[in-house]
Image: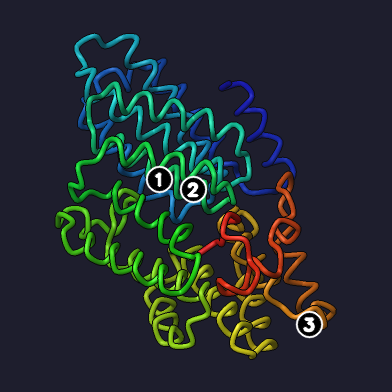
């Protein structure tokens, strides 16, 4: 692995391209193992590493994160083989977190089959750790990812598993599950959607402070997440009063969390198209996608852009801006064309012919 990494680095340097950070990390990891620099890491060090990756998931390109995670997972395996003194329960928890983060990163690249295997490892390891909240979070997060990529049947099955584990104790995992419910069951009509959002709000008010106050790591559920879910669901049902909330959401994101900002801008584009301002909505969506580096045009982002495209009237799809949006939406190697998997009806509000079983990327 280290030899391949060196070859990759030398090749990119010869070509004048940027150094591949994942290859560099693999090389660093190999050197650390040879020198024994990783053998003295405590469990707390591994827990901090998992937290760092949980923060990076939102802001680092998925491909780069996969490289870093791969190196640390290899080191984790090495430590478990050589360090019988390490607390196995806590290390299983770290391993489950690593596996879930890898599954999420792979899903964002469109490699859903490989991601499903990592989800399986994450669930089993979380269960083996005895940490029920971690098990619930893993199931809830996988359900949300499944809904986002259009696998609603899988998402609903995972939610049933959450129901068997939870005792209605407020947790981040339960919030993820209710978020998924709001995006699937709650989108049958406007009334049920609003009820689902009210239920999520009630849960949010009961969440521990360490969950609502965690704004960096993926296993937090701060107020920003609640606002994002609310604007997505209200946009999907055609709520005409969501404009100000969307503007507020866009304003919250800086340059670092660019994918979240672009998804909010895409929702604004979707809202404008749904309210009849087709050109403005199309331009907003196209500008958002054009400004986003290719490595950050993830599954979640491209499916949201596909919702904007699918909501366009047929005559608007011949516009140059519409054609460009579709190119930006599909120009990711190896990923299915999301514009072909989202029908126009599916992009409209409930009750207009859309099939609820199909996932709306909200």
Q: Residue at x 36, y 50 (%)?
A: 177
In this view of the protein, can residue 204 be seen by the observer?
A: yes
Q: Position of residue 44 (x, y in %)?
A: 20, 31
- Could you say which quadrant of the image residue 283 lies in? bottom right
Going from the N terminus, do you reach mark 2 or mark 3 first? 2
Crowding at mark 3 (Cα within 10 Å: few <14, some 14-19, many 20+): some
Q: Residue at x 53, y 54 (%)?
A: 148
* Residues at marks 1 and 2 touching, judged by CB atoms closer than 8 Å: yes
Q: Residue furthest right?
A: 318
Distance, label 3 to label 1, CA atoms, is 36 Å
Which color scheme is applied? rainbow
Distance, label 2 to label 3, CA atoms, is 31 Å
Q: Position of residue 246 (x, y in %)?
A: 44, 80
**Mark 1 lies on residue:** 141
Query: Which of the labelled discs sits on residue 316, or is there none?
Result: 3
Query: Which of the labelled discs sits on residue 202, or is there none?
Result: none
Q: Position of residue 64 (x, y in %)?
A: 54, 44
Q: Is 325 placed above or below 300 here?
A: below
Dot 3: element: helix
**Mark 2 lies on residue:** 145
Dot 1: element: helix
């Amino acid at each position: 692995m280290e030899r391949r990494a060196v070859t990759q680095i030398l090749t990119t340097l010869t070509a004048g391209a940027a150094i591949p950070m994942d290859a560099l990390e693999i090389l660093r990891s190999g050197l650390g193992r040879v020198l024994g620099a990783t053998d003295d890491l405590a469990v707390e060090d591994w827990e901090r590493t998992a937290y760092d990756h949980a923060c990076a998931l939102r802001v680092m390109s998925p491909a780069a994160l996969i490289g870093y995670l791969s190196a640390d997972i290899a080191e984790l395996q090495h430590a478990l083989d050589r360090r019988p003194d390490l607390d196995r329960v806590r290390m299983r928890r770290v391993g489950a977190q690593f596996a879930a983060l890898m599954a999420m990163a792979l899903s964002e690249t469109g490699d859903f089959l490989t991601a499903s295997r990592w989800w399986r490892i994450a669930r089993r390891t979380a269960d083996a750790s005895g940490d029920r909240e971690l098990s619930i979070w893993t199931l809830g997060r996988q359900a949300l990812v499944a809904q986002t990529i259009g696998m609603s049947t899988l998402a609903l099955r995972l939610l049933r598993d959450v129901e068997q584990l939870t005792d209605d104790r407020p947790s981040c995992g339960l919030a993820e599950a209710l978020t998924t419910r709001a995006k699937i069951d709650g989108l049958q009509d406007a009334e049920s959607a609003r009820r689902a959002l009210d239920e999520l709000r009630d849960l949010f008010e009961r969440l521990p402070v360490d969950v609502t106050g965690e704004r960096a790591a993926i296993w937090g559920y701060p107020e920003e997440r609640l606002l994002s879910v609310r604007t997505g669901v209200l946009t999907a049902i055609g709520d005409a009063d969501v404009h100000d909330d969307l503007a507020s959401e866009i304003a919250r994101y800086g340059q670092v969390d660019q994918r979240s900002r672009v998804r909010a801008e895409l929702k604004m584009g979707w809202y404008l198209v749904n309210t009849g301002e087709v050109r403005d909505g199309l331009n907003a969506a196209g500008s958002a996608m054009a400004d986003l580096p290719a490595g950050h045009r993830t599954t979640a982002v491209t499916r949201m852009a596909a919702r904007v495209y699918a909501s366009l009237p047929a005559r608007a799809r011949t516009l140059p801006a519409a054609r460009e949006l579709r190119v930006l939406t599909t120009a990711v190697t190896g990923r299915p064309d999301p514009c072909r998997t989202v029908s126009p009806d599916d992009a409209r509000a409930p009750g207009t012919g859309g099939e609820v079983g199909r996932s709306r990327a909200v």
